[in-house]
Image (spheres, coloured by chain):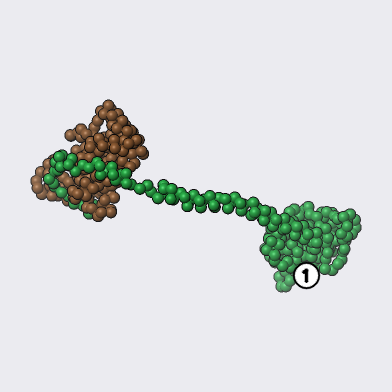
Chain colours: A green, B brown
């Protein structure tokens, strides 16, 4: 305690002297003259109360309008999405995970970005269960009728259930090959690296040739493998073109 | 050790005091008897820690103004009304030290200093007295406060506990520790 003074034997004050200094009236008048704090006065509650009421009322009034506007906007988006779904044209499937495609598609529509003409993102929730109304390829190999009768439930091409992303070499070597629901895959084009350059090879049938698998195992580990131009025949015997696949052997 | 007769009261007197407080809550003018009863006690507490007499009277008045304006918040907890006044006084004192740049003072009587030296089993010489006063300055605020209450103002542990808002036992322990600290400083 640096800032302190020690007094020894200070002269004590008498009881009478202290009592003579008592002044209760002064204390009482001070208490009576004490003003309450600002936040306890009506002057504070007047403007503040009014402001609170105004804000509450305006928020209550604005809330249905905001909700209505939001609902209308959502409806508009839904309409746009439904129209887009009807006119869907699949040429090349975007390279991204199926579950993210929906979000990307909706986000693009919401942000009014131009969707590339060649790449159309398709909303996919389950690759085993998707309904396409019309599939048109650049080469126009097949023309699927748009009538309701010809609407077929087809699946995306997959290897052991993998449509895009990482796939094991064992799955690529699988004799099942590329499957796609009721569609029997007849041919496809595979693009891979053979250690010297990129090779684009047309393959007949639905299995990846063994020599290609060996090269994939050797040189394409962890890199992109494109399977495009997948052609097949549906249960009615009609030829169909299937979306391309982008796989990463691992 | 002397007992402060104004502070220590029988249950009947405490209940009488409660009646006065209840009526003062309704009508501030009825606070008069309580003011008269405790004014000297509170003033002495304040003046003990201050050098300036006028300022001590001002602070005492301020204590009663605060007490009267906040009387509606007072709750009886089985201890004398003065313990509540002491707490207000403590806070007003700190306020005065801050705002009015008042200097904190420790008032000691020679007799009490020599008593303390005797407790340390040392010679009651003037050299030792000066040494003890220097040692007191080296103590921290809390230790000095409790030594002041116990050894210079001769208050009971119960009273110290009520003023400092601690239990009687805690007051005992704290004052013993503070004395030990002072002894260490003194013997060093």
Q: Quadrant of residue B82?
A: top left
Q: Quadrant of residue A159?
A: bottom right
Q: Quadrant of the C terminus of chain A?
A: bottom right
Q: Residues within 10 Å of mark 1 (few under 14, many from 20)?
A: some
Q: Residue at x 70, y 65 (%)?
A: A112
Which one is nearer the viewer's eye here, A132 or A93?
Answer: A132
Above or below residue A225? Residue B96 is above
Above or below residue A6? Residue A138 is below
Question: Residue lying farthest right?
Answer: A237
Q: What is the x, y in percent for residue B162?
A: 29, 37
What chain does badge 1 belong to? A
Above or below residue A222? Residue A7 is above
Q: Quadrant of residue B117?
A: top left
Q: What is the x, y in percent for residue A215?
A: 73, 66
Q: What is the x, y in percent for residue A118?
A: 77, 68
Q: Residue at x 85, y 57 (%)?
A: A184
Q: Is residue A101 visible?
A: no
Q: Which residue is mark 1?
A: A200
Which one is nearer the viewer's eye here, B49 or A125?
Answer: B49
């Amino acid at each position: 305690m640096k800032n302190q003074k020690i007094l020894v034997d200070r002269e004590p004050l008498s009881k009478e002297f202290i009592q003579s200094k008592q002044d209760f009236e002064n204390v009482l008048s001070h208490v009576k003259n004490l003003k309450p704090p600002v936040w306890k006065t009506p002057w504070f509650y007047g403007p503040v109360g009014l402001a609170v009421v105004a804000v509450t009322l305006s928020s209550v009034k604005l809330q249905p309008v905001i909700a209505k506007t939001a609902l209308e906007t959502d409806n508009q988006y839904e309409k746009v999405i439904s129209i887009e779904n009807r006119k869907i044209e699949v040429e090349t499937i975007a390279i991204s995970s199926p579950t993210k495609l929906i979000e990307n598609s909706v986000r693009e529509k919401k942000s009014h970005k131009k969707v590339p003409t060649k790449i159309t993102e398709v909303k996919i929730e389950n690759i085993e269960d998707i309904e396409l109304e019309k599939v048109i390829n650049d080469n126009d190999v097949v023309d699927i009728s748009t009538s309701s009768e010809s609407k077929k439930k087809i699946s995306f091409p997959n290897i052991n259930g993998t449509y895009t992303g990482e796939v094991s070499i064992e799955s690529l070597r699988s004799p099942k090959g590329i499957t796609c629901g009721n569609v029997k895959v007849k041919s496809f084009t595979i693009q891979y690296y053979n250690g010297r350059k990129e090779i684009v090879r047309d393959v007949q049938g639905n299995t990846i040739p063994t020599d290609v698998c060996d090269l994939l195992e050797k040189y394409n580990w962890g890199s992109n493998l494109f399977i495009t131009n997948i052609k097949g025949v549906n249960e009615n015997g009609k030829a169909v073109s299937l979306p391309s696949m982008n796989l990463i052997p691992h | 050790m002397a007992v402060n007769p104004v502070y220590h009261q029988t249950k009947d007197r405490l209940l009488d005091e409660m009646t006065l407080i209840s009526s003062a809550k309704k009508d501030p003018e009825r606070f008069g008897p309580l003011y008269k009863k405790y004014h000297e006690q509170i003033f002495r507490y304040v003046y003990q820690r201050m050098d300036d007499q006028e300022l001590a009277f001002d602070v005492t008045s301020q204590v009663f103004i605060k007490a009267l304006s906040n009387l509606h918040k007072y709750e009886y907890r089985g201890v004398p009304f003065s313990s509540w006044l002491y707490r207000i006084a403590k806070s007003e004192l700190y306020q005065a030290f801050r705002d009015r740049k008042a200097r904190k003072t420790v008032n000691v009587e020679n007799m009490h200093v020599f008593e303390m030296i005797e407790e340390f089993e040392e010679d009651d010489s003037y050299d030792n007295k000066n040494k003890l006063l220097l040692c007191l300055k080296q103590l921290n605020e809390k230790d000095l406060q409790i030594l002041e209450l116990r050894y210079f103002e001769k208050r009971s542990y119960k009273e110290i506990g009520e003023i400092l808002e601690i239990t009687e036992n805690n007051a005992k322990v704290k004052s013993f520790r503070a004395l030990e600290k002072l002894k260490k400083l003194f013997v060093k």
